Image: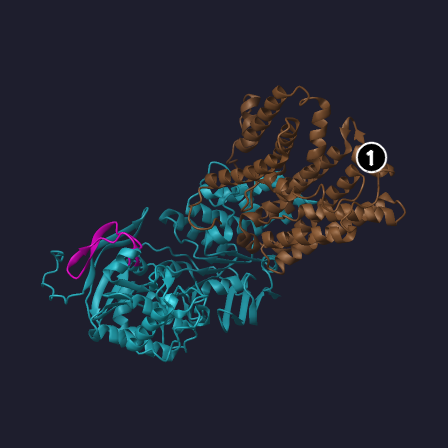
Amino acid sequence: MTALTSPPARGSALPSLIARLGAQHLSLIGALVAVLAVFGTLNDNYLSLDNLQVIAEAATITGLLAVVQTVVIICGGLDISVGSQAGVASVVSAMAFTSTGSHAYAGIAAAVAVGLLIGLLNGVVIVHGRVNPTIATLAGLAAYKGLAQLLSDGRAQGYVLGDPVFVFLGRGKIAGLPVMVWLLVLVALAVHVLLARTDLGRNLYAIGGNDTAARLAGININKYLIAVYGLIGAVAALAGILLTARTGSGQPTSGSEGLELKAITAAALGGCALKGGKGGVGGTLLAVALLGCLENGLTVQGINSFWQNVAQGALLVVAVVVQQRRSGERAVGLPA
Amino acid sequence: MTTAPPDHSPPPPPLPPGTAGVVAVSKRFGAVRALGGVTLDFPAGQVTALMGENGAGKSTLLKILTGDHRPTEGHLHLDGRRLDLRSPADAHAAGIRIIPQEPEIIPHVTVAENVYAGALPRRAGRLLDRAELRRRTTADLERLGFAGVLDPDLLGSQLTPAQRQLVEILRALTGEAKVIAFDEPTSSLSEQEVEALFALIRRLRADGVAVVYVSHRMKEIFQLADRIAVLRDGELAGVQDAAATDEGALVRLMVGRDLSAVFTRARVATDRVVLEVKGLTTDHVRDIDLTVRAGEVVGLAGLIGAGRSELALALAGDLPIRSGTAMLNGKPLGGNPGRAIRAGLGLAPEERKAQALFLHRSIRDNTSVAVLERLRRFRFVRRGAEKQLAREYTERLRVRTPSIEHEVRKLSGGNQQKVVLARWLARKPEVLILDEPTRGIDVGAKAEIYRIVADLAEQGVALLVISSELPELLGLADRIVVMQGGRTTGELDRADATEEAVLHLAMADDLTPRHPSPGATS
């Protein structure tokens, strides 16, 4: 048979690079460069290796949650309980560590198991309880936060920094990069391969793009959705474990509250269509970096953290408004 | 003032005041002509029935009458004056009402509020005057003789189909109604409810209202109508006095079409039964018996709402089977779509954009979605093999596109349909169901789809084709099964299948007791 498509012309590298990256990624890179330039000019220490490492470490936990948020948004759902899930996992990891006589792996395993269960519960409530994902995970946001507070009696639990495994996770470095950042890179790469290269990923895009068509093409939508929420639970647990390792103890709320907003903002900024079917890990990671650099810059400049909340909320709305403008939806009634 | 076109040789009798009508009205949607130069009066104090096959232009004409569409050419008149309707609100203000086929009822408010929605009586500024609202609705019900039938305080969600219809009628009669159009009003009514509705329509006629009555049911039309207007392919095929015509004459008017351009193919069917359906009953269809053999093309005919698409979705595993069986080569169908697909069934559904395509994804993605499990190594999609497959079918089906990476939403309707077919051909199904495969696509692409159907039959695929275009079915099918109201009403071999015969079976009121099937939309 003859090819209908000619291979992309191998011209100069730059245009083909631009075409491969796409407008979404390019504007994020542009914004990132601008943010770095502005704060770098205002403050000499901003671009120092030490500060960049601080930014990377601070962005890691958000990054993990943003990557799995990307997956659930691609298949047309949402999870606003990710922060609370991380809180539960943080508490569980520290408490299991303490109660097993300082077994770090027992703490980690318990946290991941609990995270997976919570995630699967979300999935089952949404799919079989027929609860809108936003409502179901809003309920989860409150309930899992309460669960973490109940388990911990509202206090920080245990002390893990006497244990080499937790110290390695929270403070260790491999080849000059923090272990935390390596973990994010690993998870992001795995999710990227899942989405871009496997049939599972194709089916996730199909479900988010047109669920009726996906169903009629033989895809078992329910199984996929429940599995995706399970994946979120497991990765949120990993984020919770890192939170414990960073702060030295299990934290029911401090450190995990508000992470859902950051994760969803990053996914939306990164090009995920909130209707589903569109997006990818690359854009989300760029948006995580952008948000992290912005937050750090504002802090370094001594801007009131209340303003940072305002800025974050505004960014999320702007990202979605831009997305909707581009899709050309009619402005009548409630948006789809 | 309107004047009749010059070719009306005998001057028409003077029309009573309150008469409405259209003059030389045409409507185009892009390149598609839905209505071409229709001139028709709806005299006051008469019931004018509007008939025609699916797609003949009835809906378009109604929508022009009620201000939903503006005519491309021509105009409306009412009471001897020319009307320029810019919106449904204009039509309402002029006294034109429509009772839609599916009543629009607000579920959580009372009947009275439903009737007066948008014009609720008020007191003391913006407070709702409940007493006045109730009084008015009660008075309306008494005036129409439905005082005992409908309680104005019932909630919208508690109403039966007939009561819902009655709410629409009450709505229509608020203000001064001069023209009232009923769009297939009896499709969800019981026998007694139909009688009550007819009594009401006769009263409206006696009050001097111009009634427009759209229906496929011959029996009703002869009970009710004074005049019968038949549309065909967007044109007025004829207007007859109800007293001076019969069913046969009307069917001939509806059909009389040039059949010379129609596709025909040779019979290649074998004796091997591939799809066997016995006594299949779902929420929408009942007692369906059907067989399709390898290499055979079976046409499924029927009017909109006959349950054809619902039957297709049940076979494809997407609607639950309540009783009866459907077997593909001895393997039971039903349960979920994945099972039907694995058994060897493919369905190209009625609404290709809503039900089949991933519009923002590439032709490659859309083609490979149902065969990814054959294209993967471990869990990784073999992209070379995937591209090769997409190219092969894109080329075989002559999809016109610059690249297989092109987004499907950018293709024309015909090419989109070919992508849907490519998806199922790539799966190599034993049974392929095509639901309205040529709807909304141009003539050239239609011919190509017919060619594909013929090729598939020659390769031994068993095909079930649903189409509302009778000439198309007559050209393609070896056998035609006709459905009405969720049941099969007959089966015609190719030799005996004519448009008249199919239409008789599709509209036959007397052959079967009526079984309303709410929700049936095919």
Query: Total label count?
Result: 1
Q: Is residue B126 visible?
A: yes
- Residue matched to label 1: A168
Residue B307 in the magenta stretch? The answer is: no
Observer-nearest residue: B277 or B410?
B410
Above/below status of A108 relative to A270: below
Q: Residues within 10 Å of mark 1 (few under 14, many from 20)?
A: some
- Mark 1 residue element: helix
Residue B84 in the magenta stretch? The answer is: yes
Q: Position of residue B33 (x, y in %)?
A: 29, 51
Q: Position of residue A161 (x, y in %)?
A: 84, 38
Q: Is residue B510 visible?
A: no
Observer-nearest residue: B59 or B407?
B59
Q: Image point 79% across, 29% down: which residue?
A: A174
Q: Which chain is cyan?
A: B
Q: Image point 75% across, 40% down: which residue?
A: A243
Provide the residue span drawn in magenta: B63-87
Quarter of the image with the N terminus of chain B in it: bottom left
Image-based side of B121 in relation to A286, left or right: left
Q: Which chain is brown?
A: A
**Quadrant housing residue B330:** bottom right
Type of amino acid at the residue the image marks with label 1: Phe
Above/below status of B458 relative to B165: above
**Quadrant housing residue B478:** bottom left
